[in-house]
Image: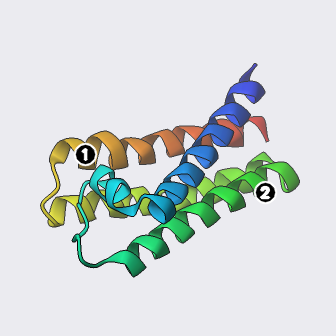
Amino acid sequence: MLTFIAYGLAIALNLLILFVGYRFLFVPQAAAAGYGVPAKADGDRAYLTIKGLRDGCYGLVGLALLAFAGPAAEAWFMLVLILAPLGDTLIVLRHGGTKAVAFGIHFATAVVMLVSAALLFAVS
């Protein structure tokens, strides 16, 4: 049962970050608003595309690690990748976003990733 939960949570997190990447590539203005720092209407397209590509790659790498390298590799990947939502928390706070978005989305994501990594280590 623990293995099912560990893999299920890891897959869900990877698919969610893949979805975030998709949103930044195909509906960047809405994705930026959901991120917590709306983009300028007349610019920022390159940066939004970069974020979409980065997040999409993170999701794909996570799925590949889980499928081909196993839970320990995925757990280490998650631990390192926790820096991204922690950084996103600070970015939202420093650039006028709300504390609710910073902590309720980005910081909470880091906490869930930490739980996921712990579960993956437990089953590896």
Where's residue 70, x and y in %? 82, 50
**Looking at the figure, which quarter contains the C terminus?**
top right
Q: Which mark is residue 24?
A: none
Q: Is residue 117 found left or right of 44 in the rendered image?
A: right
- Say which quarter of the image contains residue 55: bottom right
Q: Residues within 10 Å of mark 1 (few under 14, many from 20)?
A: some
Query: Where is 9 relative to 53, above or below?
Result: above
Where's residue 122, x and y in %? 71, 36
- The residue tagged 1 is 101
The residue lying at 46 percent from left, 69 percent from top is: 51
Of 9 and 37, which appears nearest the observer? 37
- Say which quarter of the image contains residue 115: top right
Q: Which three-letter amino acid code belongs to the residue tagged 1?
A: Val
Q: Secondary structure at mark 2?
A: helix
Q: Is residue 74 found left or right of 22 in the rendered image?
A: right
Q: Which three-letter amino acid code belongs to the residue tagged 2?
A: Ala
Q: Residues within 10 Å of mark 2 (few under 14, many from 20)?
A: some
The residue lying at 49 percent from left, 53 percent from top is: 20
Where's residue 8, x and y in %? 69, 32
- The residue tagged 2 is 64
The residue lying at 54 percent from left, 69 percent from top is: 54
Q: Secondary structure at mark 1?
A: helix
Of 16 and 104, which appears nearest the observer? 16
Q: Quote the CA–CA distance across marks 1 and 2.
A: 29 Å
Of 68 and 27, which appears nearest the observer? 27
The residue lying at 52 percent from left, 59 percent from top is: 21
Query: Where is 109 relative to 25, above or below?
Result: above
Instruction: Tell me which numbered mark, 1 or 2, is placed earlier along the sequence.
Output: 2
Q: Is residue 62 found left or right of 42 in the rendered image?
A: right
Q: Is residue 44 visible?
A: yes
